[in-house]
Amino acid sequence: KGRRDGKLHVEYSGYAGTQSAWRSLDLLNRDEYIRYGTALITNAAADEGKAPTLPGRFGKLNDPIYPGATQTYAQTDTDWQDAVFRSAPITQHQVSLSGGNERSRLFTSVGYFNQQGIMLGTGYQRGNFRINSDHTISKVFTFGQNLTISYDEKLNENNGGGRSQIKHIVHMTPYIPVEDPTLLGGYRGPDGSDGSDPQNPVRIALQDQDNTQRIKFLGSAFVEAKITDWLKYRFTGGVDYVTARQSLFQPIYNESFNARALAGLQDNRSTYTSTILTNQLSFDKTFGKHVVSATLVAERQDGKSTNLNGTGSAASNDIRELAGLISSSLGIQGGRSENVLFSYLGRVNYEYGGKYLLSASFRRDGSSRFAPGNKWGNFPSVSAGWRISEEAFLKSVPAISELKLRGSYGLTGFNGIGDYAWQVAVSQNTNALLGDARTQGTYFDRLGNTDLKWEVTKMANVGLDLGLFSNQITFSMEVYNRQTDGLILNQPIAPSIGYSNPPTVNVGSMKNWGYEFQLGYAKRSGDFRFDASGNLSIVRNKVLSLGPGISPLFAGQNADFGGFDITKTEAEQPIQSFYGWQVAGIFQTATEVKESPTQANAKPGDIRFRDLNNDGKIDATDRTYLGSFLPKFTYGLNLTASWKNFDASLFLQGVQGNKVYNGVKVLNQGMLRLFNASTDVLRAWTPTNTNTDVPRAVSGDPNNNSRTSDRFLEDGSYLRMKNLTIGYSLPAGLLQNWTRGTLSRVRVYVQGQNLLTMTKYTGYDPEIGSRFNNTLASGIDYGQFPAARTLMAGVQLGF
């Protein structure tokens, strides 16, 4: 906000830097790939008693990479990670003006941010404008407003053939060149003589364009009336408006095996409008040692969204609009949804003598997203605190500057679902065939659920705050227990039921409990200042029940990972625990295979899985819980220091004890068929290399060595230096002499982000979220981008 000193203040801040991937994987080079591919195919043929049929290219490596080229395949060794990942610039500029007097304050700013992605074809830029003001027009009335307008544009990662870019990068053949001027589009991929079919990730990044443009308007205004010294009324009205357009263009190309005969276009336009009206009455009064404050709130929030999506094909790469598409390919779909949320809140805070604290609130929310009879939810809460340090018996202990005991219990509700999730969904498409004619058809898209209701979380916590030596040392701890009832999830259903999407249901209860600790230290000595703060969080989780008639929930299936389930959610286990087979080693001899529980198609060199139910065979009933994506604990350390005009800060973040299912390892060590792979496959089992944990290389994976198992489950713990900053501010006296008061502040700094990561995880990055916001697939690495290591320099100016 603006200042009340009657002056205009101008500030500028900006930085520029570069980003790059902090890690790359060790993949096979050309010669290693040919050696590995030969073994992979030869072993598969030997299993069938046949002579191997190697890719034709393996015997023609001295051929030119394309007609007329002087370079041969034997001279080509493409590092596809280097071809796709890059050093990318990042810049930001921000200018602000602020000022005011006793009656009015104003703040306004304009900014621009540009970040090219570390992967070709990705990036983000944003321009923004902001203005805030508040005005006192009398002893009674005050009004103000906040307005932010922004425009941003994002270049999204494009998925060629439904596969992620990471999959194409790690699978792409190393002796294939990036470019081929003799082919339509100018890029090259494998053909039939290469025996493999990944797509050229450089072509996908540079030619398949997926662009999202968005304009956002976020504003609010308020008027406040000071009825008495202890009673105020405020009315606030706000609007959040977003309009977006996503344009996808996939041109005609031919990179040998993979080709596209018609260009594909998709144009998706959407709008979202949310309005909020809030009435708030506030009471704040002191009666001797008694301090009482109370708040009453009545609020209505409306949301409306629309979307219009057009798709189709074009016979030319010059056609970039829907109007030029082949009419028979054109498909138009649209939708509209609305929701409303009514909220009523009452809260009372009481304090006596600065020592005893009590607060109680009651919230009632009504959401249109639930069926009649389930729309309303009631959410009370209560908290209490005792400042023990204010008691007479502790006043005589100077070392204790603060000691407070606190506790609370309350309920919260969750309604973050689709606007019509409780209703049966009906969709239309243009794919139905009646005779030889193509016509529009209607089908049920999702089952309804009239029993859908609020997800309710009950939370109780007890905490302690301690300050020593005038708060030079601070410590706080909290113990909490949180239980969620009516957990909202999408319940998987059998495809045979005939619905495209699963119903949204309340599936029982889940419990989270844990501990949080914070420790701080502050030192002041002349021109030197030092602050350190650390935090530690311990959390545990268990599903209490899934509700009557609801079977365990499986998730994480992916065809590239063998199509097996990866997580399972059921009562008495942590939510979405990793679930699969346990590895017992590698078969060394045919006798071991024969004397072990039956594994169809197993041979020496294949993985031996544990027969957990001791029925003499390995099947789905031998799967078990393998671990959780939830960490044992998380921690952080923040250090700041300054001396005279120098300053520095350091932030470390850590996660310990969580598991990550390394899907990228399945891709580059699963050995399902001929693709490029990790250099670890060079350690694959052979009769002369038996001391290894990598199974034999055999195309087709007849033993399902790549099935979901602890072979691909890794320790996801890490410690990362998230931020390191070193700055210098020019002395005020020097600025006064040099600029005659024009400049009031000049600070320059250098900053690094993600400079150091310590982890045993072997994928691109250990910070794994969930895929497509699937809450039952967290901790599965389907192709996580490596984090960007950033180096930049910046300046801050005050006028």
Image: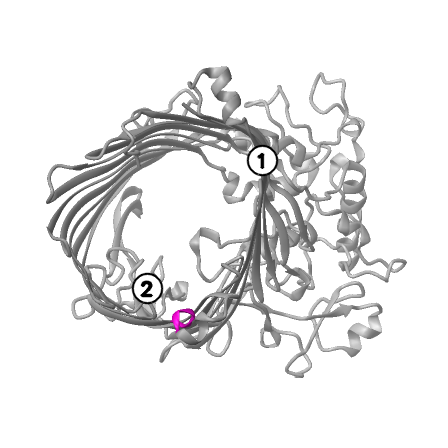
Which quarter of the image is occupied by the N terminus?
top left
Crowding near the residue tagged with mark 1, few <14, some 14–19, many ≥20 C-alpha atoms within 10 Å = few
**Mark seen at residue 504:** 2
Magenta stretch: helix, strand or loop mostly: helix
The amino acid sitting under disc 1 is Lys
In the image, what residue occupies the spot 65% across and 28% down?
178
Residue named by callout 1:
644
Is residue 679 visible to the viewer in this orientation of the structure?
Answer: yes
Res 440 quadrant in image: top left
Left or right, residue 723 beside residue 684: left
Q: Position of residue 438 (x, y in %)?
A: 29, 42
Q: Position of residue 142 (x, y in %)?
A: 15, 41
Image position of 147 with respect to 620: above or below: above
Q: Which residues are magenta?
A: 387-391
In this view, the residue in front, 149 or 503, is: 149
Contact, mark 1 vs mark 2 (Cβ under 8 Å)? no
The single residue placed furthest to the front in the displayed view is 396
The amino acid sitting under disc 2 is Thr
Left or right, residue 753 beside residue 464: right
